[in-house]
Amino acid sequence: MDEISTIFSNRTVTDIACFLKEQIQLHLAELYGRKPDVIVAGRFHDEWARISEAGINDERSGGEILSMAALYELTVWLQSENIPYWCAGTAGSSFLLYLLGVTNVNPLPPHFRCPKCGKTEWLPEKMNGITIRDGFDACLIERRCPNDGTLMIPDGHDLPWLMLWGSGQMDQNLLTKLHLQEVNFELRTTATAVGKVRECIDHHWLHQFYKDADFEKMPHDDECMLRLPHITLNGHMNTENLNSGVCQRKHGAAVWKDYLQSGHWKNDMLRLHADYPEAYPNLHEILEVAPDRPTFSELVYMYGMNHSTGVWDKMSKNMILDQGYLFSQMPVFREDAFTYFLGKGCTDEEAWYNAMLVSRGKQFATYPKAWETDEDNWILQRFRDTRSLYLFPKAHVIEL
């Protein structure tokens, strides 16, 4: 199975970084044109600067560059073998991983994109009577490109890259305090795929950069688990559970249009509640107040209210049922905490740090008294008073 580990064999960190950057820029041009919108280009440059700021000139340790390369190589092989997979956790927050074809999730803000010329149009908060909080919310809207008349594609889930890569100012004391490790990826696929990777792990090219102890076959613990440096392969998922991700990869927003309109979403939720009542304890109550035809973002937040803890309670139910709030206006994900603090004037680093604290039920840093009189002070109250809070990554739910 040498073909699993061939793309980056005998290359330096600098060579690997150049290869990845070329691939990313190639796919960026394919999707958004040779001169992409300034926001699109800025997202690429900011994220690339973050992951390449350390290690790219150090031939012994390339940090995130090496992790990204190994992940890319694995997914290229999985795709060539038609083996389904998906990336768990916050990997979907990365625009770079999306452009490399590793993830399904486009983390840019909601927008229309022309598949022919790459023209980008950013979506307003409301369009054709639809509240837009995610690009897929516009799947019912037909928009033609003003340049060539081509039907434009709605996309973009508005996920900040800091949720994956961190602020760039992380030190070991901070990571320890938050019970975090350096950036790690989890690739979920089939047991067969993990077994094939296991066969070639002893001569994987990553051995030239890491110690043998960083590779774990775990033969006596779990044959379906395998660890490469900063990457965990989980083979416990079956093909049926992974079909939705493969479908989304091929069809994007188009598949959600029929799914949401047909009512199949509700049948799937009821099935989950029946099959896994302990994992989805709130689904029955949520469905009582859910709209008959939710938008994509509403569906995501319904699932999020089951994955995150401490977010579905009497207050949430009252605000949705009696006060007219949307599910997607509730602080459900750690990305919501980051956006809240960023909107209060915090720097990227401060917003990220506070979001990580809140998402783990910890007290966040001090704040100005003026926040307590703001219109959205109820969000502050929830973040401040809820100690049982665990906020799930939004990228994980969308990727799945």
Image (spheres, rainbow, N blue to C red):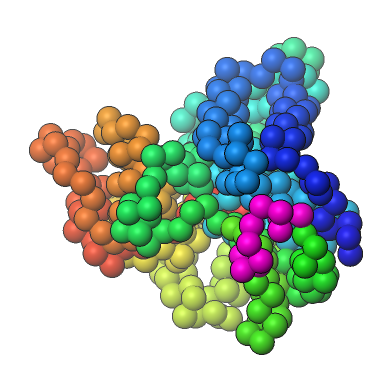
Provide residue 95's location: percent of width, then percent of height: 61, 37
Picture quadrant of residue 219: bottom right
In which quadrant will I find the N terminus?
bottom right
Left or right of 187 in this view: 7:
right
- Pick the residue in front: 209 or 295: 209
Left or right of 154 in this view: 148:
right
Left or right of 267 in this view: 6:
right
Query: What number of labels is visible?
Result: 0
Above or below — where is 238 with respect to 206?
A: below
Residue at figure coordinates x 14%, y 36% from the top left: 368
Provide residue 290's location: percent of width, then percent of height: 46, 58
Residue that lies at the very extreme toward the top in this rendered image: 147
Question: Residue 278 in magenta?
Answer: no
Residue at figure coordinates x 63%, y 46% from the top left: 60
Question: Residue 213 in magenta?
Answer: yes
In which quadrant will I find the C terminus?
bottom right
Residue 108 visible to an observer of this rendering: no
- Pick the residue in front: 155 or 2: 2
Provide residue 265's location: percent of width, then percent of height: 61, 61
Picture quadrant of residue 51: top right
Above or below — where is 223 with respect to 154?
A: below
Above or below — where is 231 with respect to 69?
A: below
Residue that lies at the very extreme toward the left in this rendered image: 369
Residue 310 visible to an observer of this rendering: yes
Instruction: Tell me the chief SS of the magenta region.
Output: helix
Q: What stretch is highlighted in magenta?
A: 205-215
Provide residue 183's location: percent of width, then percent of height: 52, 52
Residue at figure coordinates x 37%, y 62% from the top left: 179
Above or below — where is 260 with respect to 374?
A: below
Residue that lies at the very extreme toward the bottom in this rendered image: 220
